[in-house]
Image: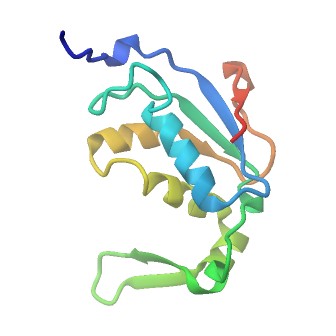
């Protein structure tokens, strides 16, 4: 018996909406990464993009449990000496909640070219509105 390997042309691409209001950041990120990767489909192949598109709405209403708002840090580097920038998640959630959600989801994707192509299928919006109605996205509960 041969192992079935899907091709990216065989993947039926669908669009899903995940509502982040009141959900934990980590649980939202795992569900979004699972859909982006295609692990919810029977044709999942690890090295092929068989996943779907994900739209995350209400990113400003996502919840961080415990003391993570004050203690967890968002770290980036400019590339220059002394260019390390750190801010806590309380500040990040006030100013750019889309960046916090995107970073959590992209951290759960492969860190290679496949992960880059999967991350392009992720759309994150601060409020409940999104411009992707023409794709007829389905609301996915998790």
| Residue at image coords 61%, 26% | 15
The extreme bottom residue here reads 82
| Residue at image coords 79%, 51% | 127
| Residue at image coords 65%, 83% | 67
In the picture shown, does residue 122 fall above or below 83? Answer: above
71 sits to left or right of 85: right
In the picture shown, does residue 117 fall above or below 106? Answer: above
Q: Nearer the viewer, residue 99 or 2?
A: 2
Where is residue 3? Give x, y as percent. 22, 16
Where is residue 134? Give x, y as percent. 71, 20
Where is residue 112? Give x, y as percent. 27, 47
Where is residue 84? Give x, y as percent. 39, 84
Residue 31 figure quarter? top right
Quarter containing the C terminus: top right
Quarter containing the N terminus: top left
Q: Nearer the viewer, residue 79 or 105?
A: 105
Q: Nearer the viewer, residue 32 or 82?
A: 32
- Whether residue 13 is visible, yes or no, is yes
| Residue at image coords 35%, 44% | 115
């Amino acid at each position: 018996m041969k192992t079935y390997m899907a091709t990216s042309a065989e993947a039926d691409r669908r669009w899903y909406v995940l509502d982040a209001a009141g959900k934990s950041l980590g649980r939202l990120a795992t569900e979004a990464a699972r859909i982006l990767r295609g692990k919810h489909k029977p044709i999942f192949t690890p090295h092929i993009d068989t996943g779907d598109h994900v739209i995350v709405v209400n990113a400003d209403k996502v919840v961080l449990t415990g003391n993570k708002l004050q203690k967890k840090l968002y770290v980036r580097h400019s590339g220059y000496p002394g260019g390390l920038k750190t801010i806590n998640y309380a500040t990040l959630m006030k100013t750019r909640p889309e960046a916090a959600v995107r970073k959590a989801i992209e951290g759960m994707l492969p860190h290679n070219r496949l992960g880059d192509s999967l991350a392009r299928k992720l759309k994150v919006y601060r409020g409940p509105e999104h411009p992707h109605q023409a794709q007829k996205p389905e609301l996915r509960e998790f």
